[in-house]
Image: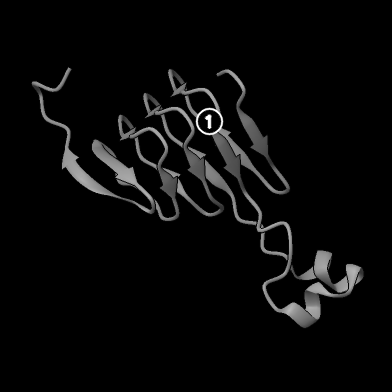
Amino acid sequence: MSSTALIAHHQITIGNNVKIGGGTCIYDTDFHAINPNTRALQETDREKKINLPVLIEDNVFIGAHTTILKGVTIGKNSVVGACSVVTKSIPANEIWAGNPARFIKTLGRNDA
């Protein structure tokens, strides 16, 4: 990891042999409430923010400058393309990329 930000208000778990490209940001929180009236008051803003754990399983490769948002699980052996925004969970053994990240293909035996 280089120039990577891990912002954990609840929990971020990273498995073994995970490669994380430079400039990646992983957030387990919204930081602020969604409702503008709630957000306007500092006390309620903090109380109403949503925190959900992030889980990155073993052998995942995350390309540089990717953003991973709260509540996401990235399954074992999966690959996330550079500059992706991951808003939902990625199953094991798949390649995803884009903004928002979307399924590209399933990893096969011959994928290097």
Left/right placement of residue 83 relative to residue 71 reads left
Which image quadrant is residue 34 in? Answer: bottom right
Residue 93 in the image: state x and y as whole percent.
24, 36
Is residue 60 or residue 15 the one in the foreground? 60
Residue 72 in the image: above or below residue 33 = above
Residue 88 in the image: above or below residue 35 = above
Q: Residues within 10 Å of mark 1 (few under 14, many from 20)?
A: some
Q: Residue at x 51, y 42 (%)?
A: 67
Q: Residue at x 11, y 30 (%)?
A: 108
Please, which colouring scheme is shown?
A: one colour
Residue 35 in the image: above or below residue 74 = below
Residue 70 in the image: state x and y as whole percent.
56, 53
Q: Secondary structure at mark 1?
A: strand
Is residue 9 or residue 57 the one in the foreground? 9
Q: How many marks?
A: 1
Is residue 80 or residue 98 the one in the foreground? 98
Residue 94 in the image: state x and y as whole percent.
24, 39
Which image quadrant is residue 80 in? Answer: top left
Q: Residue at x 17, y 32 (%)?
A: 107
Locate the N terminus by quadrant: top right
| Residue at the extreme bottom | 37
Which image quadrant is residue 112 in? Answer: top left
- Which amino acid does the dot numbered 1 rest on? Ile
Q: Which residue is mark 1?
A: 14
| Residue at the extreme left | 110
Residue 51 in the image: state x and y as whole percent.
66, 57
Left/right placement of residue 86 relative to residue 97 reads right
Q: Residue at x 54, y 45 (%)?
A: 54
